[in-house]
């Protein structure tokens, strides 16, 4: 059986199927890297996000995608005229193989500081083993974060400040990041959504994650109370990556019904 770490949908210990491999392939197609707004760039694949935030003191990368995608992400960074070696901070949204599968290799190459929440950092240190859903079926090279963030903690570099917001449910330490940018004299609140998908999970009497419903619900309520002018997320289909790119309209208004007050 080839590479079951790529098993996206099969519940462990189901074997990898051609369908699953096809899905991952379909999510990992090359995507032209581009600037989104201010100093934020998209460097991921067509459907697996990776964001580069450029500062005069070096760069911040949010997620690398899975390890097979890493060459694509690095090439995208260089294609935009930036240096992979100048990435100083590697931030994680959550500790699944399609978010941080490339962290070990990237950190080895660049020496970047890895930052994650405590609970997802623990999962990352185990290389994805013992995941409450995947168990040991979705593994990657383990990484020890250099810093753990709690809810509300800030990460700063070269005048950029990102705030960590714990939005658990999809993973126990799922981290949504926010920052404010200025473009043409106007401020924009940018939100990098961690992920909210819990539909495959056992929601009741889940001994591996007893708080899952309360966590998922409180994350939704918390996000409802947050303001975003530019919504970005771990997968392109959560923020209409293709359409926004075509329209060059990243800061599309978010319907007011989805925001509190
Ligand atoms: Zn995930
Ligand atoms: Zn994912």
Image (cartoon, grey):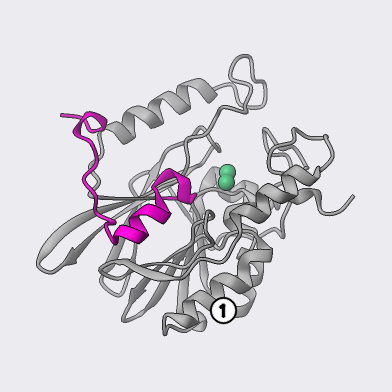
- Residue 16 % position (x, y): 81, 43
Would you say residue 112 sits in the magenta stretch? no
For ligand 1, give the image quadrant: top right
Does residue 258 appear in the picture of this structure?
yes
Residue sitting farthest toward the left: 185
Residue at horizontal 61 percent and vertical 59 percent from the top:
28
Which percent across, then down, holds residue 135?
A: 74, 37
* Residue 209 sits above or below residue 150 on the image: above
On the image, the x and y values in percent for residue 5 come to 76, 50
Question: What is the count of numbered marks?
Answer: 1
Residue labelled with disc 1: 110
| Residue 77 or residue 162, whichever sits in front | 77
Asked if 50 appears above or below 120 in the picture, the reply is below
Does the magenta run of residues contain 252?
yes
Q: What residue is at 71 percent from the left and 37 percent from the top?
A: 134
Q: Is residue 72 left or right of residue 126?
A: left
**Start and end of the magenta stretch?**
233-261
Given residues 32 and 94, the one toward you in this image is 32
Residue 201: horizontal and vertical position, in percent? 62, 26
Residue 140 or residue 153, whichever sits in front: 140
């Amino acid at each position: 059986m080839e590479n079951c770490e790529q098993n996206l949908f099969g519940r462990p210990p189901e074997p990898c199927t051609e369908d699953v491999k096809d899905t991952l392939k379909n999510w990992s197609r090359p995507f032209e890297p581009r600037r989104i707004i201010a100093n934020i760039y998209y460097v991921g694949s067509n459907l697996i996000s990776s964001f580069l935030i450029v500062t005069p003191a070096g760069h911040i990368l949010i997620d690398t995608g899975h390890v097979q995608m890493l060459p694509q992400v690095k090439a995208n960074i260089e294609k935009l005229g930036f240096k992979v070696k100048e990435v100083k901070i590697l931030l994680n949204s959550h500790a699944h193989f399609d978010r941080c599968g490339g962290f070990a290799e990237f950190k080895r190459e660049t020496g970047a500081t890895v930052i994650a929440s405590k609970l997802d950092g623990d999962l990352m240190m185990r290389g994805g083993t013992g995941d409450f859903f995947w168990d040991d079926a979705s593994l990657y090279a383990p990484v020890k974060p250099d810093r753990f963030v709690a809810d509300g903690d800030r990460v700063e570099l070269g005048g950029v400040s990102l705030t960590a917001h714990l939005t658990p449910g999809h993973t126990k330490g799922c981290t949504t990041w926010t920052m404010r940018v200025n473009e043409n004299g106007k401020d924009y609140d940018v939100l990098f959504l961690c992920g909210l998908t819990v539909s495959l999970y056992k929601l009741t009497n889940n001994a591996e994650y007893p708080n899952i419903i309360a966590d998922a619900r409180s994350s939704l309520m918390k996000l409802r109370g947050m303001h975003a002018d530019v919504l970005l997320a771990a997968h392109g289909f959560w923020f209409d990556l293709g359409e926004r790119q075509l329209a060059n309209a990243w800061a599309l208004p978010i319907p007011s019904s989805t925001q509190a007050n």
